[in-house]
Each structure stands twice: as structure tokens, then as C-alpha cells.
Image (cartoon, rainbow, N blue to C red):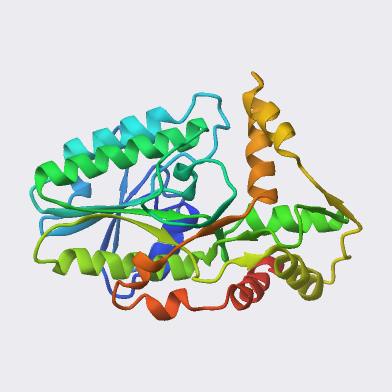
Amino acid sequence: MLLGATGLVGQAILRQRGTHPVHALVRTPDGRSWGDGVQVVRGDLHGIPEALFPSHPYVVLHFATKPRDTDGTGFDWTNVEGTRRLLSRLTKDCLGVIHGSSMSVYGPGPHLGVTEEHPLVPVTPLARSRVASEALITKHAADAGLGAVLLRPRFLIGRGDRFVLPAMVKMLQRRRQLGADSVACSVIDVDDYARIIWKLARRMAEARRPEQWAYNVAYARPLVRSEFLGTLVQGLGLPEPVVKVRVPDLLLNALRDAPSRRAQALAERLELLTRSQCLDVARLKAVPGTRALLARSPVEALRAALDTFRS
């Protein structure tokens, strides 16, 4: 059962589903072709029709989250109250929930090899809503005897990416570089992410006992800023940056503490671009079938993503 089917990750999940049947909750189907084996049900987290729930054992793939507050209403209505509503509607055939969260739950960086045991110290409203939804899912799963998987990637690249590569390309077009050459970040192609999700869903369906785990999701080796920009320069024929901008901690803290929402959003973007954001993925690597995916070179994945970006 898939929630968030029209989003970046939801579309990748459908591309990688193979022969798995899917019940997908969609607010606006848009007349697109969903393919055989996908049953589309119109609705949202606050209006889930009975038709969405399969009459046989199923795993919930919960990726219906609000990542940006474009309407100024905040994140809790969708990310927290929507999750609470979903959990209250799960039927007896549910085996567990896989939820798309984010590395943002660990708080501001720099992070170098942060593990899932790191304290959760969210500083943005979005990150706080993610921590709250994680807590709801974990508690409900433990109380109801269900599986729970919380996924925490950093940057997603590949087909459908409208944020990571476009932001880097825009900087290079202006011949600017934010952050030092040594700044590193964890990335994964969204289709590799979807392949991992299906492996975890299968593992959950076959588990003898329900488990509740959080997993960092990224390639094992981070992508260094000089590699990132160098690949874009070479692959897209962009100019080399001539201005390298440093962002001191004092400025970041001032922006983060400012009453202006725009200033706070700017602080978040600057932190992501100028501070290392690296995940330790040893826990996920121990899951059978994931090691080869996580061993993929992030540079190779970035080169492949450029083909999609050009089109």
C-alpha cells in the first residue's frame, strides 16, 4: 500500500516494483498511466477510502509527506496528524510500515559518519515534524506488534530530482561555489533508494517477528564537493567556479535564530551546501541484498543522473 505515489520517491517505487501489486493513494490521478497491477484510489491522509486497504497481508510504504511549506500552513497537519490518522486506520492484515523520513532529524551539521544512534535534535519545523511522525510510527508498531522501518537519506539524485542537481548547476552557472572542496555529502540515486525499499518491504513481509528499526540510506562513500562540481563541469560543459563562498558559524546561527521565515530557510539551505552531511550506513549494509547497491560509486551515480537531467 503506497502513499505519496506521485512524488519523487513514490514514482521510483512504482518504477522498481516488478510484479508486486500496489494499492496507491493519490490525491489527483492526473489521467496518467499507472500500469498493470497498480490500483489507484483517490484520497489523502485525512480522507482514506476503505478501497485502499488490501484484503490480504500488506506492507505500508508511507511517503506522503510535506517537504516544503509553500502555503505557510506548517508541516504538522500532513506529517504528524496525517500519520496519526493513517495509523488509526490500519487493518488487521497490515504487517508493518516503511516511512520516508530524513537525515534532518539528527540536527545541524557538520555530520561525519553519523549513525542511527545519534541523538535526535531537530532544529527546523520540518525536521521536528519528521521526528514526531517517526515516534508515532515506532510506538504504534511496538504496541500493535507490527514492523516499522524509518528511512533517513540525505540527498536524492536521479530521475525526477528538481532540487539537488538544479541547485548545484545554478551555482556553477553563476561561477560560484558554496563550501570548501573538502565538504562531503551522502547521496543515493532515487531508483537505488526504491530498490532498497522493496528489499526492506520483502524482508518485513517474511519476518518471523516484527522489528522496529531506523536506517540511514546512502552510498557507503560520500560525494566530496570537488568531485560533485567537477563531474558537473565535465559532464555539462559548465564553467569552473571563480568565487568560493565561506559561511561562518556566526552567520548561520544568526539566520537560524532570526524571526524571519525566509532567513531561517536560507540558513537551512546554506547549512546543507556548506557543511558536511555524511551518514554511516553499516546497519543497512547488514541487510541481505543491499551491500552491492550501497557499494555503488556516488560519482558514477551522479554521471548517470546527468543523463536524466539533460533530458
Figure quadrant of residue 207: bottom left
Query: As drawn, is 261 to the left or to the right of 128?
Result: right
Identify the residue shown where x is 55% and y is 24%.
72
Query: As drawn, is 228 to the left or to the right of 134?
Result: right
Q: How many numbered markers are drawn?
A: 0
Q: Position of residue 279 (x, y in %)?
A: 49, 59
Q: Is residue 302 visible?
A: yes
Query: Which residue is farthest right?
Result: 242
Query: As drawn, is 309 to the left or to the right of 86?
Result: right
57 or 231: nearer the eye?
231
Query: Which part of the image, by quadrant, shows the N terminus?
Result: bottom left
Identify the residue shown where x is 41% and y is 41%.
120
Figure quadrant of residue 42: top left
As drawn, 199 above or below 6? below
Q: Position of residue 211 (x, y in %)?
A: 18, 57
224 or 309: nearer the eye?
224
Q: Position of residue 285 (x, y in %)?
A: 37, 72
Identify the residue shown where x is 68% and y is 68%.
311
Identify the residue shown where x is 26% and y is 34%.
84
190 or 120: nearer the eye?
120
As drawn, 228 above or below 252? below
Query: Which residue is farthest top?
Result: 259
Query: As drawn, is 299 to the left or to the right of 232?
Result: left
Q: Is residue 44 visible?
A: no
Q: Position of residue 205 (x, y in %)?
A: 17, 65
